Image (cartoon, rainbow, N blue to C red):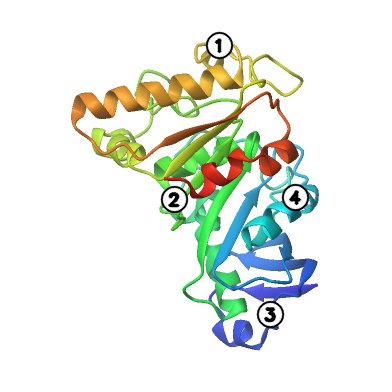
Amino acid sequence: MVSAFLGLGFLLDQMPKIDVGKSKVVLTINETSLDVFVYKPKDFGGDRMIIVCHGTLRNAEDYRDHSVAMGDRFGALIVAPRFDSERFPTWRYQRGGLLDAEGKLASSEAWTYAFIPKIAEVIKQMEGQAAMKHWLIGHSAGGQFLVRAAAFQNTGAERIVAANAGSQLFAHRDAPFGYGFGKLPESLSSDEQIRRYLAAPLTLYVGTADNKPDEYFDDSEEAMKQGGGRYQRNKASFEYGKKLAAERGWDFKWRIVEAPDVGHDHEQMFNHAACEQALFGD
């Protein structure tokens, strides 16, 4: 196990590179210690990193294990941080800590979204690969986290892939935050903020069989307005954003990619042929 601290360059300079194969590093980001499960393919070329965001079970190690084939397939370093439920409950993980536990706006430095580019930077420094590019992929709760991160955080990622997110952040102010931009301060809900969201490199990656409720399905009133299944919600959010961007003359850089006949299963989504299109397609 390796430990590293962001901002303490002299420590990072002394850290060994990540071992080939599976391992764990402990990163301290914003004075918060995170277990980060990693996998380095034996033919890793130093140019690609995929940060993998787990679901509601907080099983980052499983997500790393289930991403090994993806790492080998794409020659990418797999980085799976664990956001435990004790320190990162729903308001701080799925909703990124944008609002605190009392519903008050938090400082942007405290947002969980802000951890992502910092994790990427530490790993790049450890590897001595400042030019390494990174991609993001998250499933279920991790997909929710990344959809909302795309709206509010410059992640530095080449592409943000939100797989089978259970609820969507629609590009309007008609629903409260979590489901839309409603009830947020003007600085976070303006037309300009929504324009930037639609210009983010976001891929909604969805299994066509993830189309009905299950154990962890968000069946709240606001969520049900988005559709009766994750597939329907992803399609609806994409089409709404596409239409709005066309009406306003805004850039629209989202993509939607389907994995035929796949349900709510991150391993199947990651190993599906469509995953390459979700991450790297035009």
* Tally of marks: 4
Quarter of the picture containing the N terminus is bottom right
Q: Give the Cα separation between the discs numbered 1 and 2.
A: 29 Å
Residue 107 - label:
2
Residue at position x 46%, y 73% from top? 131
Of tags 3 and 2, which is closer to the observer?
3
Residue 60 - label:
4
Mark 4 vs 3: CB contact within 8 A: no
Q: Which residue lies under the disc numbered 3?
A: 17
For this orientation, the residue located farthest to the left is 249
Q: Give the Cα separation between the discs numbered 2 and 4.
A: 26 Å
Q: Residues within 10 Å of mark 3 (few under 14, many from 20)?
A: some
For residue 223, what is the image quadrant?
Answer: top right
Q: Mark 3: which amino acid?
A: Lys
Mark 3 vs 2: CB contact within 8 A: no
Q: Mark 1: which amino acid?
A: Glu
For residue 186, what is the image quadrant?
Answer: top left
In front of the other: 176 or 242:
242
Q: Is residue 212 left or right of residue 109?
A: right
Q: Is residue 93 left or right of residue 63?
A: left
> Percent position (x, y) of residue 136?
55, 51
Q: Earlier in the sequence, mark 4 or mark 3?
A: 3
Q: Which residue lies under the disc numbered 1?
A: 221
Q: Residues within 10 Å of mark 1 (few under 14, many from 20)?
A: few
Q: Residues within 10 Å of mark 4 (few under 14, many from 20)?
A: many
Q: Mark 2: which amino acid?
A: Ser
Q: Mark 4: which amino acid?
A: Ala
Q: Give the Cα separation between the discs numbered 4 and 3.
A: 21 Å
